[in-house]
């Protein structure tokens, strides 16, 4: 079997999170402009997996992370490497790490806001349909799959 990278059919939740983290850290190590093709290439390098631009774009979290990072990068006047060139290496790495964490924080805040909006929409629709809060807050039933696990 050849050493070629295989196309992976579906992205798992872990893959989506990793791709979002790669986007969050963009330009901390790469000075190229953020692009879907560049992201696909970097995913190949970092994860050893490949998905098409279209497959990545279908996932809302990845699409939103990409848009947020693209917007953030357009507001910056220079790449981190040139902005921090005058600093010692350890301080430069710390500044780049802080920049990545700030980017991740912005992305997570946007995702949280989307979930909040979705929750409000669901709560309203449940109320309109006459579903009570008690019914919505009822714990999930435990599924007994007939296993022999001791608990």
Image (cartoon, rainbow, N blue to C red):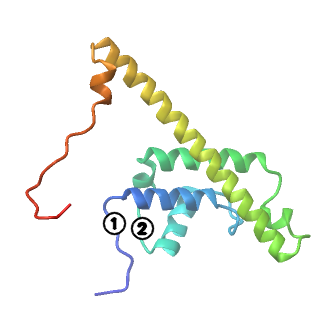
* Front residue of 149 and 36: 149
- Label 2 neighbour load within 10 Å: few <14, some 14-19, many 20+: some
Residue 62 at x, y percent in the picture: 49, 50
* Res 39 quadrant in image: bottom right
Quadrant in the picture for the C terminus: bottom left
* Residue receiving disc 2: 50
Q: CA distance from mark 2 to mark 1?
A: 6 Å
Residue 150 at x, y percent in the picture: 17, 64
Seen in the image, is 134 located left or right of residue 53? left
Q: Secondary structure at mark 1?
A: loop
Q: Residue at x 49, y 28 (%)?
A: 117
* Residue receiving disc 1: 8
* Front residue of 71 and 122: 122
Q: Are marks 2 and 1 in contact (CB under 8 Å)?
A: yes
Q: Residue at x 20, y 40 (%)?
A: 141
Seen in the image, is 129 located left or right of residue 101? left
Q: Residue at x 49, y 62 (%)?
A: 18
- Label 1 neighbour load within 10 Å: few <14, some 14-19, many 20+: few
């Amino acid at each position: 079997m050849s050493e070629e990278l295989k196309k992976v059919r579906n992205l798992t939740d872990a893959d989506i999170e990793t791709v979002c983290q790669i986007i969050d850290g963009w330009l901390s190590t790469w000075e190229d402009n953020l692009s879907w093709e560049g992201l696909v290439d970097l995913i190949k390098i970092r994860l050893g997996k490949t998905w098409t631009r279209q497959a990545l774009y279908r996932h809302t979290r990845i699409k939103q992370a990409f848009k947020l990072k693209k917007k953030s990068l357009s507001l910056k006047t220079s790449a981190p490497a040139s902005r921090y060139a005058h600093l010692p290496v350890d301080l430069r790495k710390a500044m780049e790490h802080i920049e990545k964490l700030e980017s991740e924080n912005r992305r997570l805040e946007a995702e949280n806001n989307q979930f909040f909006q979705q929750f409000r929409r669901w709560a309203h629709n449940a109320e309109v349909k006459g579903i009570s809060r008690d019914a919505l807050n009822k714990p999930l039933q435990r599924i007994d799959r007939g296993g022999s696990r001791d608990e």
